[in-house]
Structures are given as structure tokens and as C-alpha cells.
Amino acid sequence: MEIKVVIGSITEIRADAIIIGFFEGTEHLDGDTAALDKALGGAISGLISQGEIKGKLNEITVIHSLGKLVAGRVVVTGLGKPAELSRDKICGAVAETCRLLRQKGAASLATVAQGAGINDIVLEASAQAVTEGALLGLYNFRRHMTKEADYGEIKELTLVAAGQDERQRLESGCRRGRVLAEATNLARDMANEPANYMTPGIMAERARELAADCGLEYRVLGRAEMQELGMGALLGVAQGSREPPQLIVLHYRGRDSAEVDLALVGKGITFDSGGISIKPSEKMGEMKGDMSGGAAVLAAMSAISQFKPKINVIAVVPATENLPDGSALKPGDVVTAMGGKTIEIVSTDAEGRLILADALGYAIKLGAKGIVDVATLTGACRIALGDLCSGAFGNRQELLDRVLKAAAEAGELMWQLPMYEQYKEQNKSDVADIKNSGGRYGGAITAAQFLAEFVGDTPWVHLDIAGTFLSDKERGCLVKGATGVPVRTLVNLVLSLAEGVKPSP
């Protein structure tokens, strides 16, 4: 979709539809809304007085201009109560409106800076929210469909500015919104692919292509190199698959230093059957998305490379399948992770923490001064927080707070869960240093405590996206399928951390 900013009057813009925001409780029309109402002969104010337009969040009213405007339709989108407005609500309202207009055959849209000036939402933030809403809300994945789509695509979105200064500010917001939305949609593309089209090898190849396009350093470690490094946990999970495991590493250098300021580690199980501890067959197909954490960190690196922050960041993605072959790991087996810690396998379906153990160890070997890992790790987290909110854990409150702030700015809901020492008791093994499952109760926390064993004193945050990596319906910026969570959070985090990174002497 082409997104552009022009200087002019919204009443004179040529488009299939004009989108205008309206707040709940508004008594008097002003600005662009009043101008459109006048051009339409009072149609907007008439519908307000009749109670058809109330301004409730995501309420959408379509008014045909019938030749009174150059544009064919005016769409009044509810933004809710002004005191409750946020960039995320603007994003969601625009997404809902764009989807409706796509169904109605619109190919070109126009709008203004929605919500600008309300709750400290500046012009740049408004334009960013509008851009993200359009690009995220209209996303679809049709690569393997041969049937033509029921609706055409919206090809153009125009934001109308009052003058040159406003135009420049809106363009800046649009650029940021586009980078973040396209990175999120890249993660969605990868996670939506069927497992036979997203094997560990294909995932590594996608990463190589991304690195070439974005100017990132690329490396992939194969089975032999993993053996040399003692990655017995990752190799153990890979035993049951005929697909060779891959440890994917991307490196963004934003400053002249060999230091690694932050490592982003993402779980890359390209299909998870549960292994010998096999999952129920119902909805097992969704486990093609068990590499969503890996997809998120790779996609985040593409956005980071475009923003060019002065910080050094690596992405580490352990990629493999988890299948029940005759040579697969068995409950009761013991494996040795990188660094020498031994792990008793209680359940082969607790495989994500195994591959992350070695990936975290590798990030530390590369000298990462901070780590954020992202994983569809536990059903327990989904039970605790549902499908709206990701779980956040960590060993440094300062870094956790930075992550939570970055998530709030992105509109990606996260909630911190406890990491009390007493939970470690559930991970104790009678035959090894630790076991890979602490049981049903507190499962998201004991899984996080397992990972904590492999980061030592390095500042670290773990994001469990088991409940949020997939959506079963359209909701605001989300569409059915992979969500791309938490790409925007990771990018926001890196940009904020870059502001505090000191240059090398």
C-alpha cells in the first residue's frame, strides 16, 4: 500500500472514502469534521442528533457523499472517550475501518491526524498509529491459496496536512509506523507458513536473505559446531527430526565497538509435536507457529537496521523440529547443556526451554551485556493471562521496566509475573542438576526459573508469548492467524536503550 502525506483540505481530497474520527460525548463539531458536515449538508450532525453516531470506540458509520464531495464516502469512526484515547486505540480503530472499507470495494482512502493533541498524542504519534493500523489491520496471508480473494486490496492511504511543517511531522510518523508494521507483518508471514515451508533450513535461509537486504552480519551454526560447543540440550531436541538443526545468528553493529549491548533470543521450533510426550492431535497444526519467538527477533532486527540506532544488537535463534522418531529424546534421558549443566528430561514436550538454554549460553559466550528472550513457552502462561497479554519475567527490575514501557508504547500488552526463589524447588532433579519441567502448577514461572539457570548474573528478561502469538479472530490491529507479537516492543526497547549507550573510549 502506498502511504503519502499531502497539504490541502480534507473536503477536496479525491479518494474512495474519507475517514474522520469522532469522540464519544462530543456536542459541537469543529475543524475537519465540521467542514465535512457542512459539505454533506449536515449529514454527520443529523446522524449524531438521531443517535446513530455515538462515537463509541470502533463504531463505524458510512455516509455516501452523493456528489457533494470529490470523495465517494465519508466514514465516521468512533474513538471512544477523549480521556481514554491512546495510540493503540487509534491504531485499532483505523484497522477496523480499513477492513470494512476493503469489503466495500474501496481502493483509496484519505484521513487526517486522528486524535492529535489529545492526551499528549503528537502529530508524529498519530501518523504512526494510523499507518500501523492500516498496514497491520489489512494484513492477510494468501501465499498457498489459488482461489481469488473475495475483495480487492486498498492501494493508497493519504494523510492530509494543513501546512508544510505538519506535513513533515506526519511523514516522519508514517515512516516509523511503516517500518514497525512491515517488520511485524514479516514475523506474521514466517509464523503463518506451514511447517513444510518453514523448516529449520528454510528459516535459516530467510534469515540469510534478511541479513543481505538489511546489511546485517549473518552466521549459522550446524550440528558439528553445536557438538563442539557442547550444546547437548539443543541437539537432544533435534534427535527426532530428519531436518538438521540450525543456530541462526544475526549481528547489527550500530557503534564502533566489539561489545554486544543486547541479545535478542527467540525460540525457533518450526514444528512441535511434543516428541515422545506427544500432544493431542486437536489443534496440533497450530504448532507450526512454535517458532514465533524466533520470527519476532529476526523481524525486529530488520526494523532495527532501518532505524540505525547507535547500539550493538545480536539475534540468536535456535531452530529445530520436535518430532517422535525412534532416536528422539525420551522421558528420563539426561542431556548436558552448553556450560556443563545436566538436565533430566521429564517431558519431551518441554523442549523450548532446552533449546533456549543453549541459545542463552551462546549469547553469553558472545559477551551479551543484556538478554531478552521470546518464546511460545508454556500453556500455563496462556491459562494465567489468556490470549490478550504476554507474560514477562526477569532477574533485573530495571531491564524489565524498560521492556514493559516499550510494550506499553507499542500497544502490546504484557504483565510481570513473580520469580520467587521458592519456585526453584519444583525444578530439582534426583538424577541431574535440574529437570526440564517443574510440573503443572506455576508452570510459566518454573519454566522461567529453568531459563534463569543459564543466564547467571547477566541482566535478562523472558517473554512468554504462548497465549499471544496467535489470534483466532480479527480484533483491532490483529487479524486471524499469527500476531507478530512482540516485534514492536523489541524495536522500541532497542531504540530506548540506544539513547543510554555510552560510546567506546
Image (cartoon, rainbow, N blue to C red):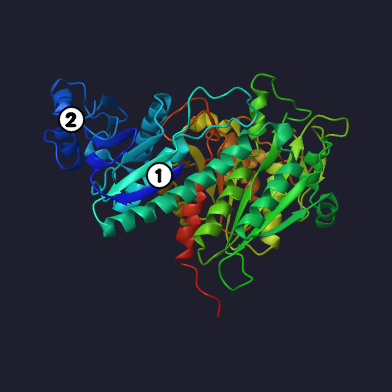
Dividing the picture into quadrants, the one containing residue 273 is top right
Task: Look at the numbered disc 2 and give the secondary structure of its residue.
Answer: loop
Nearer-the-camera pick, 331 or 501: 501
Q: Amino acid at mark 2?
A: Leu
Q: Quadrant of the C terminus?
A: bottom right
Viewer can see residue 196: yes
Q: Is residue 72 left or right of residue 446?
A: left
Outermost residue to the right: 326
Q: Which mark is residue 40?
A: 2
Nearer-the-camera pick, 445 or 360: 360
Dividing the picture into quadrants, the one containing residue 92 is top left
Q: Earlier in the sequence, mark 2 or mark 1?
A: 2
Distance (Cα) linking label 2 and label 1: 27 Å
Closer to us: mark 2 or mark 1?
2
Residue at 82% of width from left, 43% of height from top?
A: 244
Nearer-the-camera pick, 75 or 244: 75
Whether the residues at callouts 2 and 1 have beta carbons within 8 Å, the answer is no
Q: Is residue 73 left or right of residue 255?
A: left
Nearer-the-camera pick, 402 or 67: 67
The image position of residue 419, as x and y in percent, is 54, 45
The image position of residue 27, as x and y in percent, is 12, 33
Residue at 72% of width from left, 47% of height from top?
A: 204
Q: What crowding class fits label 1: few (fewer than 14 Cα within 10 Å), some (14-19), or many (20 or more)?
A: many
Dividing the picture into quadrants, the one containing residue 233 is top right
Q: Amino acid at mark 1?
A: Thr
Q: Which residue is mark 1?
A: 131
The image position of residue 184, as x and y in percent, is 52, 43
Determine whether 108 is above or below 282 in the image: below
Residue at 28% of width from left, 44% of height from top?
A: 112
Q: What crowding class fits label 2: few (fewer than 14 Cα within 10 Å), some (14-19), or many (20 or more)?
A: many
Viewer can see residue 404: no
The image position of residue 20, as x and y in percent, is 26, 36
